[in-house]
Structures are given as structure tokens and as C-alpha cells.
Amino acid sequence: MIEGEVIEPEGLRYTPAGLARMAFKLRHTSMQQEAGMQRQVQCDVPALALGEVAQKISRLQPGQKVKAEGFLAQRSLKIAQLVLHIDNVTLR
Amino acid sequence: MIEGEVIEPEGLRYTPAGLARMAFKLRHTSMQQEAGMQRQVQCDVPALALGEVAQKISRLQPGQKVKAEGFLAQRSLKIAQLVLHIDNVTLR
């Protein structure tokens, strides 16, 4: 589970099979405890949603804060960049 | 929370402040449900542990399966690559 703002939405597209597809980034900012020290974390996580979740995200305003659940996968067989696939999103 | 195998351990190092530091990759393989379809996921997640967790991971065999908890952060201010900072690790 990760919280963040929906940024850089690419707009709703469709796969060749007609499935809704929405790519965006999730800007995560938080304070974390690491080895007994507080640190600030900021990262922009490449994210992808398919189907109903994609449609739900496409209706959000850019900058909307959400809680997202999903799994990490490689962008493609050849590109090792990590992409967070979003299964479920709730507004914060 | 993510499960995976500890691969490519770099060996235990120490920060200038004397804190143990261990970089490795977590090879995650699973079946995931996405938009009603089953898919296989494999990814190698760059990971970093500090302090006691780093020492614990340095004692594992390469290939050891673990459950890890932590947070995502950018590799550095200039490098946007995501690194999973591991707070807690348990053997599987």
C-alpha cells in the first residue's frame, strides 16, 4: 500500500483487446524511520492501471491524493524499470 | 510487503558514520490478478538495508527467500531509480 498524488496522467487509452489503460505517476512523500533516524522520502513511482481502476483514476483531478494497492512489475521483458500496477485505489 | 529471493548481494559495507549498509536485489516472482486476468510477474527490485537489518541480510545465503517490509525512495536526488529500503525482513 502506498499513498501519493496522481501526477502526469497520460489520459485513458485502450488496449488492442479494448481494455481501459491509464498510465500516470504516483508522487509519494512521507517521513520514514530508518535505522533509528527520521528521514523524508519523496519519489515519483511510475504507475499503471487497467480496466475499472483505470477508469476510476481517469476521473480524478491531477494532484488528487490517493491510497493505492497493487504489485510491482518490470515495464517490459527488456526494460527493467519498475512499474506499480494498481489493483485498487481509494481517495484520501 | 514483498516476497522474494535475495540476489546480487554486494556485501556488508559501512557508512562514514559507521552504520552497516547492505545493497542487494530482491527477485520477486508471483501470480497476480489484474483486470480479471491471471498474470505472472517477475521483477528484480533494487533494495537497501541499513543498521541491524543490513547485518541480518548479510548473514543470509544468496537465493534465500524472504518477506520484506519497507518503503520506496529515489536512489538519489538526481537519479530517479526506485530503491526499496528494507525495514524488516523475515525468512520464508
Image (cartoon, coloured by chain):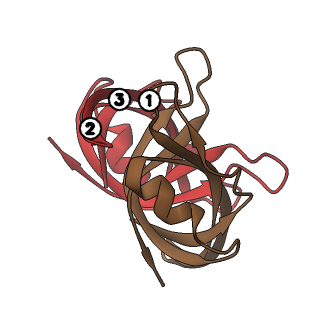
Chain colours: A red, B brown
User: Is residue B45 at least partly visible in the picture?
Assistant: no
> Which dot marks residue B53?
none
What crowding class fits label 2: few (fewer than 14 Cα within 10 Å), some (14-19), or many (20 or more)?
some
Q: Tell me residue A1's x, y (percent).
A: 31, 55
Residue on which disc 3 sits:
A41
Q: Secondary structure at mark 1?
A: strand
Pointer 1 with pointer 3, Cβ within 8 A: yes
Pointer 2 with pointer 1, Cβ within 8 A: no
What crowding class fits label 3: few (fewer than 14 Cα within 10 Å), some (14-19), or many (20 or more)?
some
Q: Are marks 2 and 3 on the same chain?
A: yes
Residue type at numbered disc 3: Val
Find the residue positioned furthest to the right.
Answer: A78
Q: Nearer the viewer, residue B76 or B15?
A: B15
Tell me if residue B10 comes above or below residue A88 in the rendering: above
Residue on which disc 2 sits:
A32
Residue on which disc 1 sits:
A43
Which is more N-terminal, label 3 or label 2?
A: 2
State which chain disc 2 sits on: A
Residue type at numbered disc 1: Cys
The residue at 69%/49% (across/down) is: A75
Tell me if residue A9 comes above or below residue B36 in the rendering: above
Pointer 2 with pointer 3, Cβ within 8 A: yes
Q: Is residue B18 left or right of residue A63?
A: right
